Image: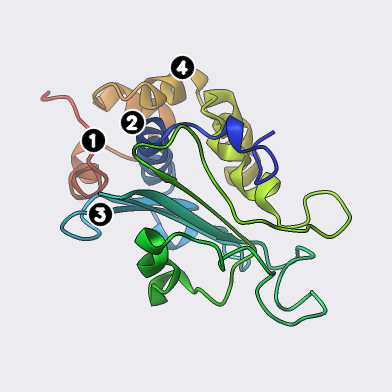
Amino acid sequence: MISTMNLSSIPPIEELRRLTKSLATLDAIIERDWNRRYFSFNSKWDTTEQMASMRNGEGDSWFLVFGPQGAFLKGFDHESKMSPAANEMGRIWPGVLSEVPEQFKSFVKEPAFSPQDTTFSIWRGHDDDGWHKGKIVYPEGKDPDGSARLLSILDGNPKTYRRWAEAYYKRPISLPQVEHVYAHKPLTEGVVQALNPGTHLAELSDELAEIDYPKANN
């Protein structure tokens, strides 16, 4: 299972970029109310950076930035043992942010990412052979920083998204259409209609442009 204790299961940078674009695209199709969506992707976050995010509306989140230096992800599970509100220190757990390399420090301080609300962070440079985290002495218990729960969607398996989406949106979700989007095939009217009969491809133009997800010409 993906977590900060099992970084080897997290996809490489480019695979993760494609995956998070797919998650944002699926949510944009299925849920037309932006405020009720979990996943988003802004391919124009900055001139050289792109940003993926998850917000569950209950105080938990993660933000993932892709830039020239690599990728950095910080997450927050407000009910985890390592939450500043829950741990005895009343602050971010030692090692979670204190050992982030200099090239990623600007992301740590980004106000839009609520840096004070952090229970885990990971990073990877483009030349690195894996993901990294700080030296952390974890408290006892299962998933103490919440990373296993919040990052499970990043396993790259379309069935994982379908299972989550059916539970959250409380309706059946077509697996072949989820697989289509996970494969980054151009989005068609048929795929959109199968996922949400009340939505049309033309309505998604602005969102697909922001995500940088391809759509069919007709």
- Tell me what residue is drawn at x 80 percent, y 65 percent: 81
Q: Residue beneath label 4, please?
A: 176
Residue 151: quadrant of the picture: top right
Q: In whole angstroms, how far apart are the C-alphas of marks 3 and 1?
A: 27 Å
Q: Which residue in the rendered view is the most extreme toward the left?
A: 217
Q: In whole angstroms, how far apart are the C-alphas of marks 4 and 3?
A: 31 Å
Mark positioned earlier in the residue sequence (4 or 2):
4
Mark positioned earlier in the residue sequence (3 or 2):
3
Mark positioned earlier in the residue sequence (4 or 1):
4
The type of residue carrying mark 4 is: Pro
- Tell me what residue is drawn at x 78 percent, y 56 percent: 144
The type of residue carrying mark 3 is: Glu
Please give left or right for residue 68 compared with residue 217 in the image: right
The type of residue carrying mark 2 is: Val
Quarter occupied by the N terminus: top right
Q: Secondary structure at mark 3?
A: loop
Q: Nearer the viewer, mark 4 or mark 3?
A: 3
Q: Residue beneath label 2, please?
A: 192
Number of the label disc, if any, that sits on residue 49: 3
Q: Secondary structure at mark 2?
A: helix
Residue 15: quadrant of the picture: top left
Q: In whole angstroms, how far apart are the C-alphas of marks 3 and 2?
A: 28 Å
The type of residue carrying mark 1 is: Leu
Q: Position of residue 22 (x, y in %)?
A: 38, 35
